[in-house]
Amino acid sequence: MNVTYINLSGHVELEKYRYVYFSIMVIAYILILSSNFTVVCLVVIHKSLHEPMYIFIAALLINSILFSSSIYPKLLIDFLSEKQIVSYEACLIQAFTFYTLSCSEYLLLAAMAFDRFVSISRPLQYHMIMRKRTVSVFLVLAWFVPACHIVVPFIGNANSKLCSFTLRGIFCNNSVHHLFCVASRALLTYGLVALFNIAVFPMVFILFTYTVILIVAYRSCGDVRKKAAQTCLPHLMVLINYSSLFAYDMIIVRLESDISKAVRFVMTMCIIMCSPLFNPVIYGLKMKEIYKHLRRLFSQTRGK
């Protein structure tokens, strides 16, 4: 059976720094798994956190774990390998997983924004609107909709003829489109539509929702303003952080901009490290209820 391999050429001075890279990424991966799992377990264990907002936060952190696990194991193997290669089929699967989980983050943040909007602007109707069934539907759609959108171009390109076998990256992402001899206009158009549906539109919805929330909070009493600031600020921080990194990947990488290999390498490392590490820290420290249980957990551990 013939297997087509793709060479990953985005590494910088790997022979010299392979063990440094490996050590940094192992530590980062352990921190990502432990910090995200800790907050998720707190939400699962404590009944006071069985509210839609905290369930969405747990789902977002689970998404971060899945996102990291789709990249880190292969990346760690590459750091210690003589050749940094991946089969074409595995490359497509990794790229599909990367963008599915990336867009799922936007939809989960959109669900959080809707939850905060209902909580602050429709407090009396909150429990009637945000029922368990509604939350479950949002969670299923957050993972199912991006997968359905993104699977189409990857299936369409699965049998495309390759004219290049070198990818300018350390894992498979948008750069895979530069391997094809001829790019399908239909799939490119579909990709733009899909990008709008599962990334741009949710981001616009989030910004619109939080703008309305801020207007409502500004016109309300001090307690409403405080509640809005405490619950909305972490979501906005996560959105800004993730959107800036996602924009780099979608624009710079797709356009194959002429930036140095070192800058490209550093930015790629930021994409796979910052958000998964940033999310549990923000939600663990900025969300009052989660922080209370987290502090109690560390106090008990220290006591033992």
Image (cartoon, rainbow, N blue to C red):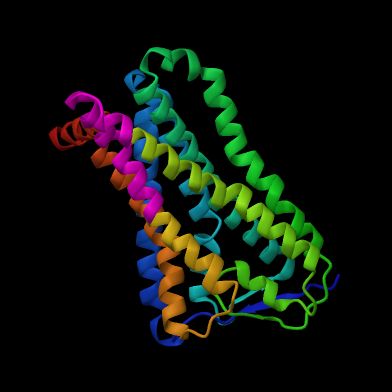
271 or 194: nearer the viewer: 194
Query: In the image, residue 167 lies at what x, y percent?
Result: 62, 78
Question: What residue is shown at x 28% (from left), y 32% (from top)?
Answer: 228
Question: In the image, is residue 202 above or below residue 20?
Answer: above
| Residue 240 sits in quarter | bottom left
Question: Count of labels shown?
Answer: 0
Residue 281 visible (yes or no): yes
Give the camera-side residue of 187 and 301: 187
- Furthest toward the left, the residue is 303
Which residue is at 40% across, 87% downward?
A: 16
Magenta segment main secondary structure: helix
244 is higher (above) or lower (below) than 300: below
Snapshot quadrant of residue 269: bottom left
**Up-down relation of residue 180 to residue 187 (above or below):** below
Pick the front one: 237 or 40: 237
Residue segment shown in magenta: 214-240
Considering the image in quadrants, where does the C terminus appear? top left
Is residue 14 something one can see in this rendering? no
Q: Does residue 286 appear to the left or right of 75 in the view shown?
A: left
Residue 12 in the image: state x and y as whole percent.
45, 83
Percent position of residue 75, x then y? 51, 67
Task: Report the side of 84 relative to 45 (left or right).
Answer: right
Q: Residue furthest front?
A: 219
Question: Residue visible at 34% across and 30% down?
Answer: 42
Q: Please determine whether, in this image, residue 57 is positioned above or below residue 121.
A: below
> Relative to residue 132, is residue 141 drawn left or right?
right
